[in-house]
Every structure is written in C-alpha cells, then in structure tokens.
Amino acid sequence: MVERYHCQSAIRMLRLELLKRLLLLLLGFVTLYGVMVLLLRWIGLENAQQLVRQSGHWAPVSFVILCAFSLIIAPLSGSSLFIAGGAIFGKQSGFLLSLLATVLGCSANFWISRKFGRNVVARLIGKASLAELDQLTGRVTGNRGIFYLTLLMPLSQDIVSYAAGLTPISYSRFAIALILSGTVIVAAYIYLGSSLLEVLL
C-alpha cells in the first residue's frame, strides 16, 4: 500500500514537472520567436538568404553546429533556430540540416552522460533540471524504454537524451526513438513555424 502511494506520488510529480517544463518551453519559444521575427524584419529575409548563399558551405555547417550545441547546453533551445533555418535555407534543406543537428546534439548528450555520469551532466543542464532527469531515468529502462523515449522526446529532447545515457538502454534503441521523434518535432518547427514566420515577415 505504501509502495503504491509512493508510485502514484512520483507519477503526479513527474506530470507536474513535465507541465512546468512545457510551459517554460512555450514561454521561451514565444520570446525567442518574437526576437527572431524582429531581427529578420530588420535584416530582411532576402538579405539573410543572400548572405547564406554567399557564405557557401560555411553557412549550413555553422547552422548545424550551432543547433547541435543549443541541445547540448540544455537550458538553450534549438527550436527557434530550426524555424529560422527553414526560412533562410528553404524548408527542405532546413529540415535536413535541423534533423542532422538534432541527431548529433542528442547523441552527444547520450554519450556525455554515458561516459561521464551525472556529475558532469548536472553542470550542463543545471541543478533545476537534475530532479527531472532522475525521474526520467526510471521510465526509460526495460522493454518499453524506446516507447517512453519516443513519447517524452518532444517535451524535452535535451533532458531525455541525457537521461537515456544514464540508463542501460542501448544507443541503437535510443537512436530509433530519437530519429522517430526528431523527424516529427523538426518537421513541425520547419513546416509550420517557418510558414508562420514568412507570413509575419
């Protein structure tokens, strides 16, 4: 009976943490989206696209590195960068570059936590996210781990990928969940977010 109560309490806390995380992500997304709209209005979308074309291969390489890094440093978010990438590089190229950045960044998170453990992860994600990380590690183990990963990734790719590295789940199983969820997440940002951005500009 006591064990059941603790289990239900843990589930309620996880739901509250996920809701809090979702609201914070939404607030951060709206803020960054507004800044990005103002910046691109000031520069001009055509000018930004012309600058990218003149930069040659450096522009997409820099974009992938920047987006991947934003996922490794967990409080940052690559979502607004994905949207800007869709507007500047075009939706198809922006999608491929953003998906590549997602796979690279989240894979780096997985291997950082797998190799260095939670002390190093705590420095990268901050103490506020550490409790959330501990709750997630208990839910991504076992046969249904890949299912939980796929469902949880859209809420917090960075934290979930760090959590997965602290569990016994294999990288191949993690990669399947990452690619499945990453494709949906990036497609939503690129095809919905970028279209809205173009309308606002």
Image (spheres, rainbow, N blue to C red):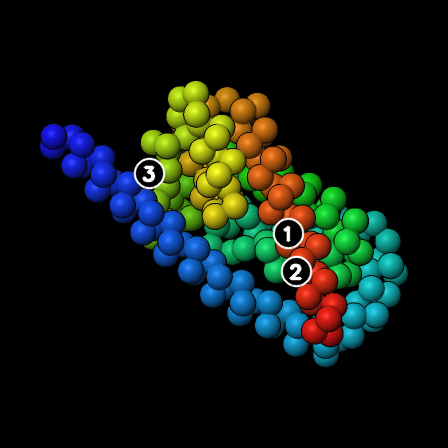
**Residue carrying label 3:** 134
Q: Are marks 2 and 1 in contact (CB under 8 Å)?
A: yes
Q: Quadrant of the N terminus?
A: top left
> What amino acid is labelled 1 in the image?
Ala
Q: Is residue 3 above or below residue 58?
A: above
**Residue carrying label 1:** 188
Q: Is residue 31 left or right of residue 136?
A: right
Q: Which quarter of the picture shows residue 41?
A: bottom right
- Between circles 3 and 1, the one closer to the viewer is 1
Cα distance in 3D space between marks 2 and 1 = 7 Å
For mark 3, does the 10 Å Cα neighbourhood hold few (<14), some (14 to 19), or many (20 or more) residues?
few
Whether residue 196 appears in this view of the structure is: yes
Residue 6 position, x and y percent, is: 18, 36
Q: Are marks 3 and 1 in contact (CB under 8 Å)?
A: no
> What amino acid is labelled 2 in the image?
Gly
For mark 1, does the 10 Å Cα neighbourhood hold few (<14), some (14 to 19), or many (20 or more) residues?
some
